[in-house]
Image: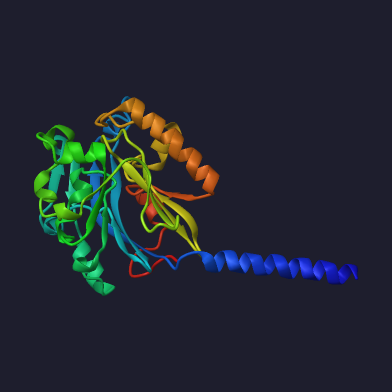
Amino acid sequence: MKLTHLALTALTALALSGCAKSDKPNLILHVFECGHVEVSDISIFSPGVDEGVTKHLTNSCYLIQHEKGKLIWDTGLPDAMAGNPGEAFGGKLKLTVTNPLSKQLAEINVNPADIDYLGLSHFHGDHTGNANLFKNAALLIQQAEYDAAFGENPAQFGFNPASYDQINKEKINILDGDYDVFGDGSVVVKTAPGHTPGHQVLFVNLAETGPVVLSGDLYHFTKNREHKRVPSFNFDKEQTLAAMDVIEQFVDAEGAQFWIQHDLEQNKTIKHSPEFYK
């Protein structure tokens, strides 16, 4: 009788576990490499530390496919930069594109016109570079970022309106805090201001891989995350530090992986499209 009871308990637990897993939406996550950034002085990202030290950063974009629609998260450096390198910060950043985002989407038979949602962590040019590809998508943007990006002086915040001037303004979804994209908790925009006025990160809860948080520019590389260092060009240092605390607590509570979008070393451990995560 004791053995039967234990067996039934085990079978019940297994059944409940199976039900919980099957209840998760069938998400697919593709990771794209959307440019490279050669930094000649990494101390602009960590003031007073590593002055004159060089570092190579990557630039990541993502596609999340849900039964209710497709979401692009960040769009990288512009495809037009392929074969035509650029620079920023007075030449301290060398910008290159070797594999255009439009080409990577075509390789998995995804048409930019079929993207339902465009989520940008923020409006710096290395994240909005291909935003104009997604003219049919509904932009997900925090109110503070909207005011800065579409206000009278976007350049004051380091934004380039020409990189996003073809976004469908009739479909803009202005957010006030966290936002559950598909209404089931599987893909959630999390507000994390400070790097820019309305910076945000993305939570994706995958059935097999488990929960993942996509960093935006909350951090640019692991060392800055470990030491909570704030780049010299951030909009608001105190807001950034507060956002770091909130998101780190969320990551711990969810047991989530934290993918730093610009971290080259970490990105080498993550599989890229056409492979995907489920």
Residue 15 location, quadrant: bottom right
Determine the residue positioned at 59% across, 68% down.
19
User: In the depicted view, which residue is nearer to us: 226 or 154?
Assistant: 154
Q: Splitting the image into 4 quarters, where does residue 130 fall?
A: bottom left
| Nearer to us in this view, 228 or 24 | 24
| Residue 142 figure quarter | top left
136 vs 264, nearest the viewer: 136
Look at the image and tell me in which quarter the N terminus lies: bottom right
Q: Residue at x 11, y 45 (%)?
A: 161
Q: Position of residue 77 (x, y in %)?
A: 19, 52
- Where residue 268 appears, as percent x and y from the top left, is 39, 56
* Image position of 162 (left or right of 52): left
Query: What color scheme is it?
Result: rainbow
Residue at screen point 20% across, 41% down: 146
- Residue at 25%, 68% (x, y): give it: 105
Q: Give residue 167's position: percent from left, percent from top.
A: 15, 54
Q: Quadrant of the C terminus?
A: bottom left
Position of residue 129 in the picture relative to residue 189 (left or right): left
Q: Nearer the viewer, residue 94 or 190?
A: 190
The reply to whether residue 54 is in sight is yes
The answer, for residue 49, to whether it is visible in the render is: no
Q: Position of residue 84 (x, y in %)?
A: 10, 55
Q: How many marks?
A: 0
